[in-house]
Image (spheres, rainbow, N blue to C red):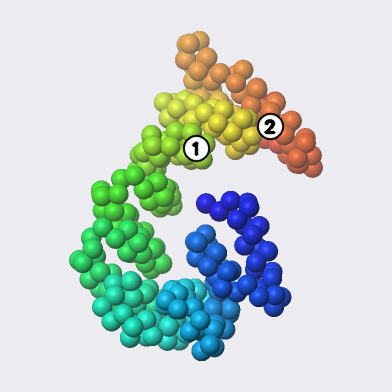
Amino acid sequence: MVTKTEETQLNQLENQVENGGGGVWEYLSLVRKLKVRRSEIVLKHGLSILNDPGKRSALGPDEWTLYEQVAIAAMDCQSLNVAQNCIKVLKKKFPDSKRVGKLEALLLEAKGMWEEAEKAYTSLLEDNPLDQVIHKRKVAMAKAQGKPSLAIEHLNKYLEVFMADHDAWRELAEIYVSLQMYKQAAFCYEELILTQPTLPLYHLAYADVLYTIGGLENLIAARKYYAATIDLTGGKSTRALLGICLCGSAIAQLSKGRNKEDKDMAAPELQSLAATALEREYKQKAPAKLNLLSSALRSLKIS
């Protein structure tokens, strides 16, 4: 993750470069170091160096790093001819390089040549089955083709080996949610909470999924995770506060006609506290929408 200091430094360098103040190589190096995408600017100023024989030769071995960086930026910008020319230069210099092979596969992908790209990635994985980047490219390619089931298959295979990859678990969960496969999504969020229990984002997402699945047991669990989100954010999660209210209302509806102990599961005091916190926050940050919120809370029989 890029820190505020690093982002400030990057933006200052970018303004300097864009206004002709020099520092192009320093900017390109910082973009690589921070692993951020500023593709249009990288393409523009990277090409200005590569097209100048004097500047290019002054880079020494870093010349090839710049060719790679410009090739990726060119693919981002759909300047595929530029990307192809950069890859051709790299292929000539490093004919047996797997790294260049990845760029060639990326170019096939950028051109929409899915079958050829799939074959290229499969071939690269035969040489190195543990290459995480290639596994993730196969997932991205499946998504780009509108094949979420195939993306799920690739992610499940990937997670059999790289079980600690939080981003992959989250990606899988989001695909499951998009397909309304909520029980499978819940399992993914459980894995994420187990490995990163202090991240409120996962508690909130898990609570949303449980609320969507519904049923008394799931609603009570969802309320617990909304409460955990509120605790972890210091009471600053508006979504979690509203989730508490929605869960309480739904639990009360399902508890109708039951004994007093079951009815107490609705925890009206907790709902009331959440509603008060919501109204206070809206009054401070969005007063124009306070009446709308109050109306919604009244419909839930809270306010």
- Is 250 rendered above or below residue 7? above
- Is 152 rendered above or below residue 189? below
Residue 88 percent location from the top left of the image? 37, 85
Q: Residue furthest right?
A: 288
Which tag, 2 or 1, sits closer to the chain's start? Answer: 1
Residue 71 shows in the view: no
Q: Residue furthest left?
A: 126
User: Where, quadrant-wise, is the C terminus in this rendering?
Assistant: top right
The kind of residue tagged 2 is Leu
Disc assigned to residue 278: 2
* Nearest the eye: 65 or 235: 65
Label 2 residue SS:
helix
The kind of residue tagged 1 is Leu
Foreground disc of the pair 2, 1: 1
* Nearest the eye: 54 or 267: 54
Disc assigned to residue 46: none
Residue 154 shows in the view: yes
Q: Residue placed at 55% from the left, 31% from the top?
A: 232
Disc assigned to residue 199: 1
